[in-house]
Amino acid sequence: MNDQSNIPVTFEEIPFADLHISDLNPRKVVNEASIITLAENIRAYGLIQNLAGFREETGVGVVVGGRRYRALALLQDDKRFQTVTVNMAPDQATAEYWATSENAQREALHPADEIQDFGAMEKRGATVADIATAYGATEAHVYRRLALATLPCPVIDALRSGDISLSNAAAFTISDDEKLTLEVLENVRGVGESDHRIKKMLKPDAIKDSDRKAVYVGLDAYKDAGGRTSSDLFADEVLIDDPAILDDLFGKKLAEASEGLIAEGWKWAEPINDSYIGWYQIDEMKLVRIYAENGDLTEEQGEEYDALAELAESDVLDDEGQAKLEALQSILDGSFTDEQKAHAGVLVYVDSRGEVQCETGLIRGTDKKAAIEAGVLAKSNHAGSSGTKSSISNKLRIDLDRIATGSRQHASLRDPEMLLALLALQLSGKSGYTNVLGLRETEVPNVPTTEMAGYALDERLTKATRPAKFGSDMGRVFRAYKAKGPEFIMEEITRHLASLLMVDEDLGETIDKAVKTDIRENFTPTAANFFGRVGGPYLVNLWCKLLDLSEDHPTATTFAKLKKSEKAEKMEALFGDPEMRNAHNITETQAKRIDTWLPEGMV
């Protein structure tokens, strides 16, 4: 068959019972849910497009309209669809052509056209359900398209022309300022900007409703105070548009929580704006911790506690078991006496989940004498000690400094011109008494005493140069060396200058910014190079901080019971073993915190 333009058009009314899907029909896989939706559309609006068929031995085979045929099969309780109009192919060759062509030539409506049509239908009075039925779409899809239909026309035009993506267009729906919307559109048109960046340009100060402050204050309280919100339908979140109001409410509510603790008998309670308080903050505030009078579990209670804690660790503990575990933990934790409270205070903060947490039993320096006299605090045997001793020993601190130096040297290899400029700075005398480079016989240490455990540098910083043999002709050695060419010479200068880098803090910050020094690019904390060299309480605090755990959480208390070596091994696994992270259901935020964490003093 050569001339497809002269195919005769023949329509026949065929009883549905005489129809079947022809083997010529190419559509073999269908979505049953979409067939149900299509059936609802046909019941509401009728069969807009006829089936096409070919008379076969067993009846009329449907070659075009397989989805419509399947939808009609669901409508046989309706007399309107028990007889169907079918466009009949005059021969098999035509039927084969129709079957292939109808599916191959189909083109989906452009999202911009669909958005504008949805909006036009709504303006004509169509409900979301009506639009969903007409398009065979879900109501959720219609709601999203209608949200896009409210965008200024230039945004829809940019989507149609391909200057922005559909997800870019969705990002614009958070804005209620048309002038700003159009300004941002011009800035991002055709540059492939991320959705997140567009949202930040439209609402730079907006805060998500999942933010800890928003969770703690509550959306209702925020709105009652006059706070405005906007919805990001596509990200299924609410945005806080007045962060100043939220901050004010947050501060007041946290202050009220602090006052409540004072009413319970604590000498003082100080609200802290941070989402976590570690031992180092307590140390900086010159606070000394005392502990509650611990309770004791019977042997039977101890066995039950261990069994429940193991179930909690595996996330299989039911509500009843959780309640029992908390009751036993409360006994273990004990409580502070009235006399302890009279001399100590509390730091109050809201964690990343929006829940109030307290660091209790903290004595200020000005209250230490009275606390010692009252027998609440033991007198220190170390003269001159005014606070908690750092968990990082001097030897470990030297090793961490070497790692930081090595990381800076590693990064500086990326910028040979900067290294030459530093060399010129020192040789010119401009740096005064400050040595920028270690131009002496002594090396600048960049390898810790634990050597390369969890630590890796560019091999150019660790590769030793083979010296000339004793008694060699140095003129000949130099000529051979120089003959290797300027590129080789520059590489040698670069690697050796980098290995001699030993700048002070101010210049170091400038260099780090220029070469993008990232200590974690070279250093991963391990049991050998760090965790096994600090105390158990430090590891417990760090474990809780990284995993967003309160001190009494079963995962935290189970970790605290481990031997120090076991704690160190578990911390190493948390930093380097994907299976360990999966076992603890590490979130994206927690993973980022772990992957960027550094011991204090290295940041």
Image (spheres, helix red, strand yellow):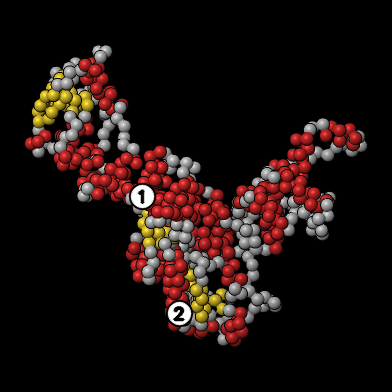
Answer above or below: position of 367 versus 460: below
For residue 526, side relative to residue 501 (left or right): left
Nearer the camera: disc 2 or disc 1: 1
Q: Is mark 2 on a helix, strand or loop?
A: helix
Can residue 172 be spotted in the picture? yes
Is the residue under label 1 in contact with that under label 2 (CB below 8 Å)?
no
**Residue 75 place in picture, x, y as percent:** 13, 37
Q: In which quarter of the image is the N terminus?
A: top left
Q: What element carries label 1?
A: loop
Residue topped by disc 2: 259
Give me the residue at 45% from left, 65% from top: 243
User: 61 or 287: which is nearer to us?
Assistant: 61
Q: Residues within 10 Å of mark 1 (few under 14, many from 20)?
A: many
| Residue reaching furthest to the top | 2
The earlier-in-sequence mark between 2 and 1 is 1
Give me the residue at 38% from left, 64% from top: 228
For residue 496, side relative to residue 524 (left or right): right
Give me the residue at 19% from left, 25% from top: 52
**Residue 212 place in picture, x, y as percent:** 44, 63
Query: What amino acid type is highlighted by mark number 1?
Result: Leu
**Residue 336 place in picture, x, y as percent:** 48, 79
Q: Examine the image and state in which quarter residue 554 appears.
A: bottom left
Q: Examine the image and state in which quarter residue 112 appears.
A: top left
Count of residue discs: 2
For residue 374, side relative to residue 556 (left or right): right
**Residue 602 place in picture, x, y as percent:** 64, 58
Answer above or below: position of 73 versus 402: above
Query: What amino acid type is highlighted by mark number 2?
Result: Glu
Whole-number angstrom distance, CA of label 2 to CA of label 1: 48 Å
Residue topped by disc 1: 151
